[in-house]
Amino acid sequence: MSTLFAPAEPAVESQIFDRAETMSRDQLAAVQLDRLRDTMQRAVTLPFYQRAFSASGVTPADINTIEDIAKLPVTTKVDLRDGYPLDFLAVPRADIVRIHGSSGTTGKPTFVPYNRNDLDVWSDLCARFLVAGGLKSEHVCQIAFGYGMFTGAFGLHQGIERVGAAVIPVSSGNTPRQIMIMRDLNADVIICTPSYACTLAEGAVAEGIDPKTLPIQFGHFGGEPWTEDMRECLEVGLGIKAFNNYGLSEVMGPGVSGECAYRCGMHLQEDHFLVECVNPETLEPVAEGEPGELIITTLTKQAMPMIRYRTRDICTITREQCACGRTTMRMSRVVGRSDDMLIIKGVNVFPTQVEEALLKVEGTTPHYLIEVDRPGSMDVVSVKVEITPGNFSDELKAMQQLHDAIDRAIQQVTGLRMKVELVAPKTLERSGGKAVRVIDHRREKGLI
Ligand code: DLL
């Protein structure tokens, strides 16, 4: 078994929320096939899928096993954009009870409509991964995701309520207020992006509070890529157990997968999503344990069924059964999105690799910004790294040693030399949600 999926010591006492999580693989395949056929019937009511199916010569009658999914055409972000605002709506408008949007910051969002059933399923799926990660009805959960078009806050909110735990819907930002509320209401669970959890720890220190004395004991983090080193940093810094969960608005939002007590990969909720892991160039399936792009087909989504949505998220998968008893396939951490992957002098680098390198060096923080430019014919990558207050000094020699250690670590992990710039604590902009890790000036200049 790859170490990625080796069970760790159980971090919490967790329970099975739903019998569907422990079905045999055969039972699961039968459920998936049934639901896939149903999804196909919904999809063929949409002009986009009518065109796509007829172009690839398939009809719902051609789907006889779940492997037949590979016969179907893929759906991309561009297809969704072209279908703005609601071309993918497969139920009467009057049945819509909520519309969320993708997190794109530029241009028009991608709208994602839900009917009543979709919201119910979404709540259950978020409850499932939270319970797998130890959530109990006595917990008090502070949600520091932004409430808005983003699916993070609402999805987790519904899941927590379904478990019967308490929600404090603080929303994002205003770190001092987050800390005050957390302490005054004794919140023991924090829900946010991993990068914002770092900001919270830092905010506590700024107020003279030891972050480990905050009441939170568990963090359910997601919405952006992060590393094992970052988990350790958050667990030690905040004195918590940190869990990873994954999802994307186009297929639902959070709730696609999440970690159980053993934290050895995120359990994919396969009775609601048919997940493939493929080579992004050829779209051929990769072998288990090999990195590939996830392609997700919704199996129960009614308002907006998605057939073979290309997530661009790169990770590995395993079907080996987990020590927790769940039979579902697990995905590793997402190393990055294929569209965030930097190709520098022919070498592929994900921002998470830079994070991994930085966190190996004592005195650095998880606050960093990668900038890529092509001033002449060559690409130049620079990394601004924030140094911990205790390590930031005016003494040139000490700073040079730290600089060189970071330089070596980056080269070791990525195979590339990057221009390292040490910056003072709190120099880089903080985000209340997803952290911006890369600015690619080549894109602004139209060079890529
Ligand atoms: O980020 C949904 C979500 C919210 C998931 C909160 C978990 C918690 P979008 O805004 O549509 O939806 O962004 C989806 O974020 O394709 C991944 O690239 C990335 N992403 C989400 N969760 C993780 C994670 C939400 N745990 C995009 N690790 C996805 C790495 C993640 N990347």
Image: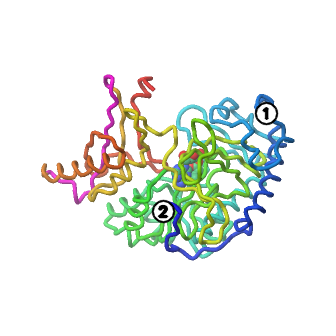
Name the chief secondary structure element in magenta.
Answer: loop
The residue stretch that appears in magenta: 375-394
Name the element at disc 1: helix
Residue 144 within the magenta-colored segment of the rendering = no
Specify the amino acid type for callout 1.
Phe
Identity of the residue drawn at 31% across and 38% down: 382
Q: Quadrant of residue 159?
A: bottom right
Residue 390 within the magenta-colored segment of the rendering = yes
Identity of the residue drawn at 59% across and 65% down: 167
Instruction: Identify whether 429 is placed above or below 377.
Output: below
Name the element at disc 2: helix
| Residue 368 place in picture, x, y as percent | 35, 47
Q: Earlier in the sequence, mark 1 or mark 2?
A: 2
Specify the amino acid type for callout 2.
Thr
Q: Which residue is mark 2?
A: 3
349 with respect to 52 (left or right): left
Q: Which residue is mark 1?
A: 53
440 with respect to 408 (left or right): right
